[in-house]
Amino acid sequence: MQSLLGTVISTEQTPTTADYSFVLDEKSPVKKGQFVQTESEEGVIFGYVSEITCANRYFERAESVAEYERETPISTHFPIKSWEYAIAEVRVLGRMRKLGDKYIQSRVSLPPSPGTKVIEADEEMLRDFVGFVPNGILFGKLQNHEVEAKIDMTRLLQKHLAILAMSGAGKSHLSAVMLEELLDRPKEDGRVAMVIIDIHGEYAGFRQDPKYGKKIRVINGKDVCVPFRRLTSQMISSWVSVPPTGQRELEKVLREMKGEEKNERSLFSIKDLITRIEEEPMSNTIKGPLLRSIYELRNLRLISQSKEKPELRKNVSPGEMLVLDLSDLDDMRKKKVIVAYVADRLFRLRSKVQIPPTFLLVEEAHNFAPEFGKSEHNPDKRIIEKIAREGRKFGLALGMVSQRPVNLSTTALSQANTHILLRVTNPNDLKHIEESAEGIDSRMARSITSLNVGEAIMVGEAVRYPVFLEIRDRKSKKVEKGKPLHEQAIEYENSSRKTEEEEEEELEAFL
Ligand SMILES: Nc1ncnc2c1ncn2[C@@H]1O[C@H](COP(=O)(O)OP(=O)(O)OP(=O)(O)O)[C@@H](O)[C@H]1O
Ligand SMILES: [Mg+2]
C-alpha cells in the first residue's frame, strides 16, 4: 500500500495541468525529487516533487517577529509548532493508464481538484515510467524510492555512454559496478565482450577476484605488442611524424617487405625496416628525416616479430573482460598509440564480425580524445571519434570516463546518448555538461554540484526520464590506489626506519 503524503491545495497559480502543490500531512516523509501520484477525473496523474517550502503564519511579518524576539522568543507565548506546515510543489509528468501489464502515458488535460489526496508513486508504474527492465544492469536504487535501478543494456550502451564527474566522485566505482553486471549477465540475455583502457590499474583487481577472476585477462602496457606484419604506412604516419616527402618511399619499402613476407614466409622486424630504408636509393634530404621517424617508432618498443599481444581476435570474448593496464607506462605517446591501435583493431574486427559485440571503456578519455588537438597528431582521437560516430551500427559501444569534460572531444561526447553524471563543481565543466547532455534541465544541472559520493544522475537514451540514482557497493575486489596522505607518510617513515635498523643489524653481524 502506498503511503498517503498530503492534500492538493489551491494557490493563485495552481493547480494546473502542468503543476500543483500539496500540503504535507504531518510527518509525511516527502523528499525533493520524489515521484508522487494523485487523481483527476481523467485518471492517475504522475509527477515529481520539484521543491518543498515551509511556512508558518507566526513568522510572516518581519517587524512583529523582530519585536517579539527582542523581549522573549515567540515560542514562549504561542503554539508556533502547530502552525508550521510544509508545501510540496509538483511538476506534472503525465497521465498514466494501465493496459495489460504496461502503462500508457498521455497528456494531462484536467488538473487535479484541490482537496485530492496525494500518494507515493506506485513502484510498478514508476519502473515502467523510467524504463527500468527486470534483466537490466543493476546500478543501485532510485533515490527516494525502494526501486532497483535496472537499466536496459542495449539502451545504455549501444549509442555510447559518458561518465562524467570531478576526481574522486565515484566514476571508476560506478564503472566497476556496471562491469560486474555485464560479467554476471547470462548468455540468454545477450552478453557483450568488454575491453577496458585502464590508466591507473584500477580494474586489474578483477583478476584476483574469486568470482570474476576466470573471466578477466589483464595485459600490462609494457607487454603490449604490435606485430610488424600488421604495420601499414598510414599507421606509422599517424603514430610518429613521418615527413610528407618520405611517405611514398616508406609505402614502397613496406609494400616490398610485405610481399616478401607472404612469399617467403619470413618475419621482419623494425630493424629490417631501418636497414631497407638505409639501403634504398633516395635523396639524403628524404632519407634522414624518414629514418628519424622510424627510430621514433622503434623507441616506442611496441613493434615486434612475435605475435600480437593481446591477441584481440582471440581474447575478446562474450561475457569476458580484457583489461589493458597502462599504469606501468610513463610515456603518454605510447599510451596514445596503444589506444589508437587497439581501438582501430576492434573497429575493424567488429565490422567484419570477427569478434562479438564489444563495449570499449576508456578511462581518462579526455587524454585520448582531446577537444583541443588536431586529429593528425592524435590517432587515438580520430578512431575514438569514428567509433562514436559509426560504432553503433555494428555493435561496438563506447564508454568514456572523464573528470575533465571540457577537454573531451565534443564530437565524441555529442554522440554519447546516455550521460551518467556524478558530482561536478567546476563551472566550466558544468556548462559543458549542460550543453552536451540532452534532456538535462536547469534543476538537475544545479543539483550536480551538491551530489554526494555514490549519487549519480542518469540522463538520455538509457532512461525515459532523467533520474537520481544511489550507486550500489562493489561486489568485486578493489585495488587500493592513492592511500590517504597520512598513511603514505607513516608507511614511508616505517619502511625507511626499517632499513636503518637492518643496516645496523648487518653491521653487527659483520663485526
Ligand atoms: N557508490 C559508492 N559506494 C561506496 N563507495 C564509493 C561509491 N562511489 C565511490 N566510492 C568510493 O569513493 C572513492 C572515489 O571513487 P572513485 O575512485 O570511483 O572516483 P573517481 O571519480 O574514479 O576518481 P578519479 O577521477 O580520481 O579517478 C573510492 O574509494 C570509492 O571506493
Ligand atoms: Mg577513477
Image (tube, grey):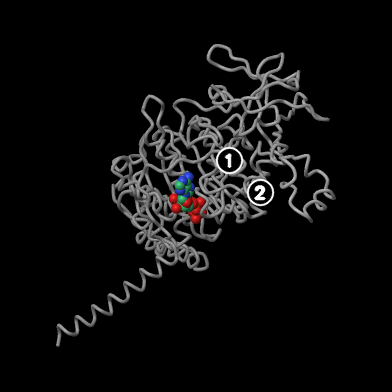
Residue at the farthest top position: 100
Determine if residue 274 is in view. yes
Point out the tag, 2 or 1, that comes first from the N-terminus.
Answer: 2
Q: Is residue 152 left or right of residue 185?
A: right
Q: Residues within 10 Å of mark 2 (few under 14, many from 20)?
A: some
Q: Nearer the viewer, residue 307 or 401?
A: 401
The label on residue 27 is none
Q: Where does the image place residue 5, in percent across and percent down from the top left? A: 63, 28
Residue under label 2, please give it: 432
Residue under label 1, please give it: 457
Position above or below: 460 against 407: above
Q: Is residue 455 left or right of residue 436?
A: left
Q: Residues within 10 Å of mark 1 (few under 14, many from 20)?
A: many
Quarter in which the C terminus is drawn: bottom left
Residue 26 occupies quadrant: top right
Position above or below: 31 against 259: above
Q: Is residue 212 left or right of residue 190?
A: left
At 67% from the left edge and 54% from the top edge, which residue is drawn? 427
What kind of residue is marked 2? His
Residue at the farthest bottom position: 511
SS assignment at label 2: helix
Q: Where does the image place residue 198, in percent across and percent down from the top left? A: 43, 51
What kind of residue is marked 1? Ile
SS assignment at label 1: strand
Q: Is residue 382 left or right of residue 337?
A: right
Distance from disc 2 to disc 1, alpha carbons, whole Å, reads 16 Å
Q: Where does the image place residue 269, in percent across and percent down from the top left? A: 34, 57
Q: Where does the image place residue 431, in percent across and percent down from the top left? A: 68, 49
Determine if residue 248 is in view. no
Q: Are marks 2 and 1 in contact (CB under 8 Å)?
A: no
